[in-house]
Image (cartoon, rainbow, N blue to C red):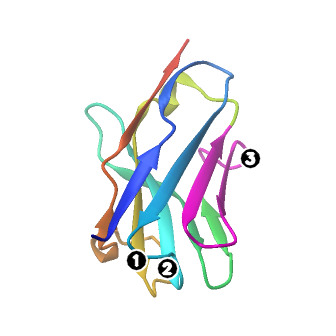
Amino acid sequence: EVRLVESGGGLVQAGGSLRLSCAASGFTFDDYAIGWFRQAPGKEREGFSCITSRDGNTYYRDSVKGRFTISIDNAKTAVYLEMNSLKPEDTAVYYCAADYRGSDCATQAYLELWGQGTLVTVSS
């Protein structure tokens, strides 16, 4: 079965750090665009970071630039999101998603694989 498995969410104080993982199960991330999305209570799901496995290009939304880092392992079996200087407004359910042969993560409808989500709660 082809699926994405996220892990690493939890409760952290403001200013703290968390590392999320998105593991590819049943396939590898060879020639994929992989993005991180989040949905806060009462808000729409938003994309905030993306990486393309063919060239390693990355994208960050301004709200997380300089605090979050997306990376992919050499075997292309997992994508990571290092989150530092967390703020209460970062509280959300975080999802990873993947688009085969995608060049970016801008259009959520193109991302054919989605993880189950992991909750990140940042306390003030």
Disc 2, SS? strand
Which-is-in-front pick, marks 3 and 2? 2
Mark 3 — residue?
A: 66
Tag of residue 99: 1
Tag of residue 32: 2
Going from N to C along the chain, the mark reached first, 3 or 2, is 2
Residue 4: % across, % down: 38, 60
Going from N to C along the chain, the mark reached first, 1 or 2, is 2
Question: For the residues marked 3 and 2, what is the alpha-carbon distance in whole angstroms?
Answer: 24 Å
Query: Given the image, on which type of amino acid does mark 3 rest?
Result: Gly
Q: Is residue 63 magenta?
A: yes
On screen, residue 36 above or below 19: below
Q: Residue at horizontal 60%, vertical 50%? A: 81
Residue interval drawn in magenta: 62-83
Going from N to C along the chain, the mark reached first, 1 or 3, is 3
Check whether the beta carbons of the residues at disc 1 and disc 2 lie within 8 A of each other: yes
Question: For the residues marked 1 and 3, what is the alpha-carbon distance in whole angstroms?
Answer: 25 Å
Query: Given the image, on which type of amino acid does mark 1 rest?
Result: Asp
The residue closer to the viewer here, 122 or 3, is 3
Query: Given the image, on which type of amino acid does mark 2 rest?
Result: Tyr
Residue 60: % across, % down: 61, 58
Question: For the residues marked 1 and 2, what is the alpha-carbon distance in whole angstroms?
Answer: 5 Å
Q: Residue at horizontal 35%, vertical 35%? A: 40
